[in-house]
Every structure is written in C-alpha cells, then in structure tokens.
Amino acid sequence: MTRLGVREHHRFEAAGKPYLYLVPSAAVVGLDPAADMVMQVLGSGAKTRTDLLALAGGIYTDQEMDEAVSDLLTMRAIGPLEAPQPMPKILPLTPVPLGTMVLNVTNQCNLACTYCYEYGEDKIVDTENGAQPKFMSIETAKASVDFMLKEAGEAKSAHLTFFGGETLLNFNVLKETIPYARQRAAEMGKDVDFSLTTNATLLKPDVIKYLVENQVGVTISFDGPPEVQNKFRVFHNGTGSYDIVAPKIKELLQKHRNRPVGARVTLTGGNLDVRTIYTHLTEEFGFREVGFAPVTTSSKREYALDEQGYDTMLTQFTALAEEFKEAAIEGRHHGFSNVKETIQEIHQGMSKAYPCGAGIGLMGVSTSGDVALCHRFAGSDEHKLGTVRDGIDRSVQAAFLDSHHLANKTDCSTCWARPVCSGGCYHEAHTRYGDTTKANLHYCDWIRSWTDVCLRVYAEIAEKNPAWLAQFDREPMAEKVS
Ligand code: SF4
Ligand code: SF4
C-alpha cells in the first residue's frame, strides 16, 4: 500500500491556529485539528492511509481523518513517498518587459556617509578614475528614456527612478528628462511614473514645488534622531547633517501631499534602535512609510551587523510588526514598510527564482549610459548588460539569468524560506563574498525568523480582517530601490 509523507512546508501558528506555508506553491493554508495531527504524525515518518486511521482511533472519526488526508493531498501538503526531485530550472523568456529603470544621474555626493556602498570602503565602482562622467548629460538621459520605453515592450507603463550620488546635484537633467519621458511615452501610448531618492540636503523651495507639481515620488535617506543621523550621515568636513535636512524634510512632507513620501533608514551595528527611529520619523516628521535596511558591508567593518545585531534587529522588527498587525486588523494605517512588502509577496503567492528584478525587469543606468544589473552596480564593467544606445547584450543577460538562478544555490534548495528570499541581494553577496552568484548564507537565520514573523502577521490579518488584504490584489509589486 502507498505510503504517504509530508511535502516541503513550514508550520507556524497564528491567532491560536496551526498554518502551513507550502514551499513549492508558496501558499498559506490553515489546518483543522485532524489535518494538523496528520501532518505531525507524517512528520515523524511516512505512513499508509490505513496506519493513519488506526493511529487516530478514538481521537478523530474515520471520516474526519479521511477528509483531512484528502484535503492535504489536494493541497499537496502530503503525497506518496517519492525520490527527491531536483529544483526545476526554468529560465525567463527574454526580453522581459523593463518595469523599472534607475537612472544614476550623478555619481557625486555632497555627503560622505561612512557606510555608503557607493563611496565607502566596500565600493564596487571607482567613480574618480574618469571612466564614468561625474554627471549624466541630458543626451544620455534622453537616450535612457528611449531605451526604457523600447525595453518596456508591450507594457503600458514604466517607472523611472532618479538616483545618485546625490540625485538633486543634477536637478537640471531631471527637469529636462521628465517632460521628455512624458512626451515620448504619450506618443507610444504609455505612461511613466517618476520617483527619486535624495539625502534631502538640496530640497530647496523651488525643488519641492517642482516635485509636487510633477507628482514625483520621493524617498529620503534619513537615519532618524540627531545622534543617529549625525553618526554616519555627515558632510565631507565631518559635520552631521541633521540640522540641515530636518527643516527641509518637514517642508517637503507638509507640501508633498499627492504621493506618500518614504524614509529609508540604514541600520548599522551601533544603530539598531528601530522603535525610537520609527517613532521619531512618523511622529516628529510625519513620514507615512518608513523602511529599514541593514547596512551592506563587509563583515570586517566596525559598523557591520554581527549575529547579535541581527538578533536585536529581529526583536525590534517583531515588536513593530505586532503593532502593524493590530493596526491592519483595526483598518488603521501603519507605516512599517518592511512587513508590508513581505506580506504583499506572501499574499500574491510569490515564489522567486531570483531575489529581485535586477537584470530582468529592473536595470540601473550609469552616468555614461552603461546598463547594469541594478543601480548599485551602475558603472561596473563586470556587471554591465549593455548600453542605452546599443541596447542589451542578450547573450550576457542570458548568461546572468542562467548563473544566478535559485536552482544553482544548493544551500537554498532545502530552505523553506526560499520562495521569499531566493538567496538574497546580489550586491550584498558581492560585498560579502565577492561573487553575485553566491547565496547570502550569513543571514539565513534572520531571513527565516523574519519570514516566520511575517507569515504569522499575514495569517492573523487574513483571519480577522481579510478585506484589508484586498489592496494587494490591485497593487502590482513595485520594485524596491534602495
Ligand atoms: S540565502 Fe539562506 S534563507 Fe535565503 S533561501 Fe538561501 S538558505 Fe534560505
Ligand atoms: S536587492 Fe540588491 S541586487 Fe536586487 S535591486 Fe536591490 S540592491 Fe540591486
């Protein structure tokens, strides 16, 4: 008789009930007590259907057990014992429409943040050797727009993000690029949505007016209270930037009402007070969304996160995620964007073969017009996919997709968190291991624990206020640019 065993899953509890995260399908399913018992029994070893019924005698009726087994078979949580299958390696058919293009309009910055991945000790591109211009020209910016609209293919909309260095050092190019992109897109029956990332030092009234009038989305790199912001986010002479940026940020937040302005916080070994930062940014400033990212750096740096740092970050994230959950259940807004992004992926059943859209639906353009995997690699010859003038070298892109597929990451093949993580950021892998194809095994415990927290938040919201999740049925996943 056929013996049944469990298929790859992660069990968790939410709102007092057991749930499964089914790894192959990335689905979340609730279990009734009989189904939970079947999973627990099969978890300790394969059994036949008859064995299962006998084991449950006196606890559940044969009919309850039969139904539980049938349901679990249908959802593929259990199945006949089979030899382990290798992970399928299905490469995307290229060209994939380009949804987000990040334009590095300058590689210069008026701040000298110690931990910066662009200028700090772990930088990839030498921006001072003259190989890349310091500022993108309007011709290159326009060629980039033409490239983006062509690469968007049949898609009706594209997203253009301006990035730096400090983006607003090249505000003139931004101002010329936006109307050009609008006009070219309209001629092709498309829409373009615009955003930028800035350190806020150059947010003068005329700049703010322009961003408001043109509905440009803004993300501000800002670390929080003065003692935190001034620790790493300093001018070239070493003075902190808090007093300069704080009034400008407040003015922007007060005037830019047609799109949410987000804050992007870099967490370092000595700066992990997530709760204090979140409160400062939302209550003192009025940011609607706050996203936190651990610093990308070699483990040697004194500001790198060590194991204890990841533990602290998890504790703090978990507390904020609890608050987020309570708010969602009561239909209130909460601005902790890290949890929102992950539960959006869970809700949409995302199972990623690649950790992000880099090199597929997202690309970064350097000041010279070289096209790279993403903005963090813009200007790196090693990570170049083509140029905006000559287009993408499809053989280079195909080789990238082949070598970076999740199926190549053997350590990930048995990890239940792989639909969400898929090995993690290429830039992080490059900084840690010198190789973008490597899985980021230094943060697996953190990723799995955080995914578990997000699953529990998701399931409890689904249980208590499912209507709140409908927003993710409408919203396409936006590529995160940080
Ligand atoms: S990097 Fe670690 S957490 Fe991420 S999928 Fe691979 S094994 Fe899992
Ligand atoms: S996750 Fe990493 S590789 Fe992907 S777009 Fe972001 S920075 Fe680039």
Image: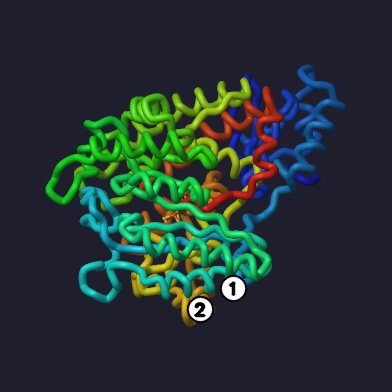
Judge left or right: residue 258 versus residue 254: right
Residue at screen point 51% across, 74% down: 397
Which residue is painted at 61% across and 32% down in the image? Answer: 458
- Residue at left offset 30%, top offset 73%: 132
Q: Three-letter amino acid code at disc 1? A: Lys
Closest to the observer, 435 or 195 = 195
What residue type is disc 2 on? Gly
Image location (x, y in percent) of residue 194: 51, 55
Q: CA distance from mark 1 to mark 2?
A: 9 Å
Question: Which circle, 1 or 2, is nearer the viewer?
Answer: 1
313 lies left or right of 98: left
Tell me the quadrant of the picture where the N terminus can be found: top right
Pointer 1 with pointer 2, Cβ within 8 A: yes
Can the viewer see residue 431?
A: no
Check the image and report above or below for 229 versus 284: below
Question: On the picture, is 187 further left or further right than 140?
Answer: right
For mark 1, what is the residue?
A: 150
Give the residue pinned by disc 2: 391
Label 2 crowding class (10 Å Cα cut-off): few <14, some 14-19, many 20+?
some
Vertical arrangement, residue 200 with respect to residue 35, above or below: below
Disc with the residue nearer the chain's start (1 vs 2): 1
